[in-house]
Structures are given as structure tokens and as C-alpha cells.
Amino acid sequence: MVRVNIDENNDIAAQMRVQSVPTVYGFVDGKPVDGFSGAQPESTVRQFVDKLSNMGGAGADVAMVLEAGNAALSEADYGTAMAHFQQAMGLDPASAAALAGVVRCLTGTGDLEGAAEIIGQLNDEFLEDAAMKQAIGALELAQKAAGAAGELDSARAAVEADANDLEARQSLAMALFAVGEHGEAMTHLLESIRIDRSWNDEAARVQLLEFFASLGASNPDVIASRRKLSTILFS
């Protein structure tokens, strides 16, 4: 609740067409949706507040469910995350953030075909949503990494034979990421950066940033790897 002194804020009073005090406006999503002027009985005020609560309740519920879904997603708990995102879609079928969460869950569980099918059916409005762009990026990275999964054993053997083989270490990082070993994958990229950050046009750093974007800033492995990256770059 915000109280505005109209004597000190004449421009706001004029914009809101305030002609008497008290004047009360209710806002939902930053837009005025209802209001009243003058002293009103308690029953009228309660009715006014209840109306605003009902109008804003769905949005608040969706936001809370999305937050829970993203928290589960950051812990790779895809089953719980999927349940939350589907619940959010039930509350708001037009929520691009909820659908993006579904796409990321499918990607995380390896159902790349299912995730791609959803993306292929989206209109421009959904595709331009920030959360959906992140989900698409995660899917594209997973598709790229899937091709490297079969090279896991050979890439690991090559790195064990020569720790300075940065091409093999890059392949190993991609293969590890493809099988869900995100922390280890990022550790190898960090080691590549430590050995020679400029190798192949900073390929290790570029790939590491793609991992960060795919997993999200709240992911524990991302948080830890960001700290290590800063230490390497600024040491």
C-alpha cells in the first residue's frame, strides 16, 4: 500500500484525475483496475480489497509455482519441476515461462525429440520470451552434446594419457555434459582455461558460458564454476 500526498505530487493527482480525498485506486500488474473516492463503509472497503485479491491471486500463485519449479530444476529434480510447471500451465495456459520449464524438463531427462516438438509448434510471441529462449538454448546444447556421448571413454582415455590435450578435454567435457555429469564437465573446461585460455579462440571459455546459460544462474554447479572461473581469469 502506498499513500500519496496530492499537495506535494500534483502531477500524479492530475494524471489519476483525483478530485477529492480520500481517493483510493487498486492496481494489478501495474494497471489501475478499480477505485473509489470519499469515506466508504467497511463492507465496501472489504469488497474492494477482496476483488483485488481475486484479480491478483492467480498471478501470484503462478509466480510461486514457477519459482518452485525453477528451484527443483536447478537441482535436476525433473519430476518435481515438471509437476510444478504443468500446474503453472493449468493456472495460466498462456505462460511462456511455464512452457519453457516443461521444455527444459524434457531436455534434462533426455527427451530431446519431445522438447523439439513443442518448440516447433510455438508462435513468435512464445519464441521471443526470455525464458523460452533459454530453454531453446539448453535444447540446442543438449542436441550438440548428444553426439559426443559415445566418445566418453575414448576422450577420458586421451586426457588421462595427455593432460594437455585440450581438444580431447573439450570432447570429454561435452560427453560428460551429455550424460548429466555437469559439474565434472565444467571442471575439465576450467582446467583447459587454466592451461591455455586462448586455445582455439577461447573455445573452453565459450563452451563453459554455454553450459552456464543452459543450466541457469541458480544451478549449484554453475555457481561453483563461476567462482573458479573468476579465480582463474583474475589470478
Image (tube, rainbow, N blue to C red):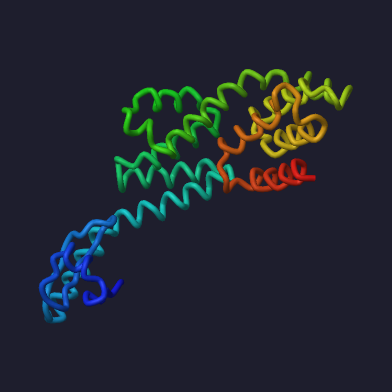
- Is 233 left, or right, of 41 in this rendering? right
Image position of 127 (left or right of 165): left
Q: Residue 148 is drawn in which quadrant?
A: top right
Q: Quadrant of the C terminus?
A: top right
Q: Residue at x 32, y 45 (%)?
A: 90
- Asked which quadrant contains residue 5, the reply is bottom left
Considering the image in quadrants, where does the N terminus appear? bottom left
Residue at x 23%, y 56% (from the top left corner): 31
Say whether residue 129 is left or right of residue 137.
Answer: left
**Please, which residue is most extreme toward the right here?**
161
Tally of marks: 0
Comparing 18 with 126, the one in front is: 18
Where in the figure is residue 177, as x and y percent of width and height?
A: 66, 30
Q: Position of residue 187 (x, y in %)?
A: 75, 37
**Residue 231: x %, y % from top left:** 76, 46
Report the residue at 45% width, 33% height from top.
133
Please say if 130 is above or below 39: above
Camera-side residue of 214 and 87:
214
Check the image and report above or below for 156 versus 37. Answer: above
Instruction: Tell me which residue sits at (69%, 18%) in the image.
Output: 150
Q: Is residue 224 above or below residue 42?
A: above
Q: Position of residue 34 (x, y in %)?
A: 16, 63
5 left or right of 112? Answer: left
